[in-house]
Amino acid sequence: MTGPPPDGPKPDAGPAPAPPTGPGSSTGPGSSADPASAPAGPAPRRRGRPSRSARDAAGPATRDRILLAARGEFAERGYDKTSVRGIARAAGVDAALVHHYFGTKDDVFAAAIEMSFEPALVLTRLLDGPPDQLGERLARAFLGVWEDAATRAPLLAVVRSALTHEGAAKVLRGFVLRHLLERIAAELSVPDPTLRAELAAAQMIGVAILRYVIEADPLASVDVEQVVQLVGPVLQTYLTT
């Protein structure tokens, strides 16, 4: 009869088995528990300010490229359908860089207006000529900006946006009052100079809309110098009498 083994040292069972490794294990290479070998996912998207490298790489040329892209987007899509992301995409930059330079969409629109109207800013310098020819000089200079194909397209975009969207109209009004009418009014020696300047602007903008936006004939087809000769005396009355 066989009894229980006598007391004494138990036989050596050998070294403990190594933990399993391989694709199905929880500790082997490539497992989620191994941070060094975990697959790298896409970097989280940055929001807010552009990265330092993006800001360092930017400059006046980048700002101008954004403005040109904005002007093109507003011209093609109108104010409502244009977005900061779309402007950034057209300019080839990050949307955060657009915000960095300009702020909101309204701010970008205002800067695009200023770029579009830059040739028209010479109107204020025309006040230095003979007073009895002021109306004619203003009419010729203003219509000359619209007659130039290079400056007409962005102006059309600005005016069309302002005609269809109150936000765009508000920005345009602010620009026209600040950069054009207030400067002209400051040089006039007549009662109610701001009102006179606004009436003159209304006359010129009305002519521009009928001739270049709506293209109403015969105004759209008549020679520009004939328009100058007819509109000039009206502007002269507003500004000097």
Image: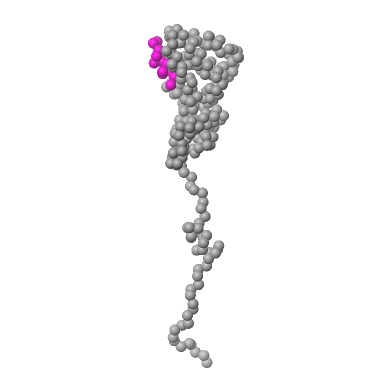
Number of numbered labels in the structure image: 0
Residue 137: x, y in percent? 48, 12
Q: Is residue 106 visible?
A: no
The quadrant holding residue 128 is top left
Who's the residue at 51% across and 90% down the image? 2
Q: Is residue 201 visible?
A: yes
Figure colour scheme = one colour
Viewer-nearest residue: 62 or 207: 62
Residue 143 vs residue 195: left or right? right
Who's the residue at 53% across and 26% down the image? 161
**What's the magenta region?**
179-191
Who's the residue at 42% across and 22% down the image? 178
The quadrant holding residue 130 is top left
Q: Is residue 136 above or below residue 107?
A: above
Residue 30: x, y in percent? 52, 60
Who's the residue at 53% across and 22% down the image? 151
Residue 152: x, y in percent? 54, 21
Q: Is residue 27 above or below residue 213?
A: below
Q: Is residue 189 magenta?
A: yes
Image quadrant for the C terminus?
A: top left
